[in-house]
Amino acid sequence: LEAPQEVVFICMSCLIKDMNGKVDCARANAIRVMSHVLDPAMAAQIDRYLKIAIVDKHPFVASAALTCGMHLLSGTLDVVKRWINEIQDTINSKHAMVQFHALALLYELKK
């Protein structure tokens, strides 16, 4: 179903607001949802937020941002390729889940 443009805008602004909030669980869930509803033009606009989320100290947020990158690869490869430095930083994380998602995303980028 195609949603009207104003409805999409309202949903995206709510998700971006949640991404910038202080509740880590809400931030991670907003990133996960956003990866499924983003179009390529909007991905470039929220690039900065996703870069910050990739290097977040909370593993749930970082993992959500990395899996968002995996979902965005098919439509916005050039946007995700700009995150290589941040992705490589997260490989040294002390959390195995974050390391796994970072390695999987790097593998998909290099493939």
Image: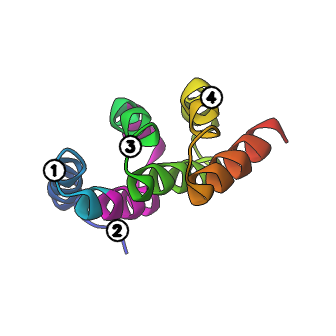
Q: Are marks 4 and 2 in contact (CB under 8 Å)?
A: no
Q: Position of residue 58 (x, y in %)?
A: 37, 51
Picture disc at residue 57: 3
Q: Which image quadrant for residue 67?
A: bottom right
Q: In which quadrant is the N terminus drawn?
A: bottom left
Q: Is residue 88 above or below residue 10?
A: above
Question: Magenta residues?
Answer: 28-44
Residue at the far front in the pictured view: 94
Q: Are marks 1 and 2 in contact (CB under 8 Å)?
A: no
Q: Are marks 3 and 4 in contact (CB under 8 Å)?
A: no
N-term-proximal mark, 4 vs 2: 2
Marks 3/4: CA–CA distance: 18 Å
Magenta segment includes 37: yes
Determine crowd level at label 1: few under 14, some 14-19, many 20+ residues with C-alpha closer than 10 A.
few
* Mark 4 lies on residue: 84
Q: Is residue 101 visible?
A: yes
Q: What secondary structure is found at the residue carrying circle 1?
A: loop
Marks 4/2: CA–CA distance: 33 Å
Residue at x 67%, y 55% (from the top left corner): 100
Residue type, mark 2 in image = Glu
Residue at x 22%, y 48% (from the top left corner): 16
Q: Pick whichever, 2 or 95, lies toward us.
A: 95
N-term-proximal mark, 3 vs 1: 1
Determine crowd level at label 2: few under 14, some 14-19, many 20+ residues with C-alpha closer than 10 A.
few
Magenta segment includes 73: no
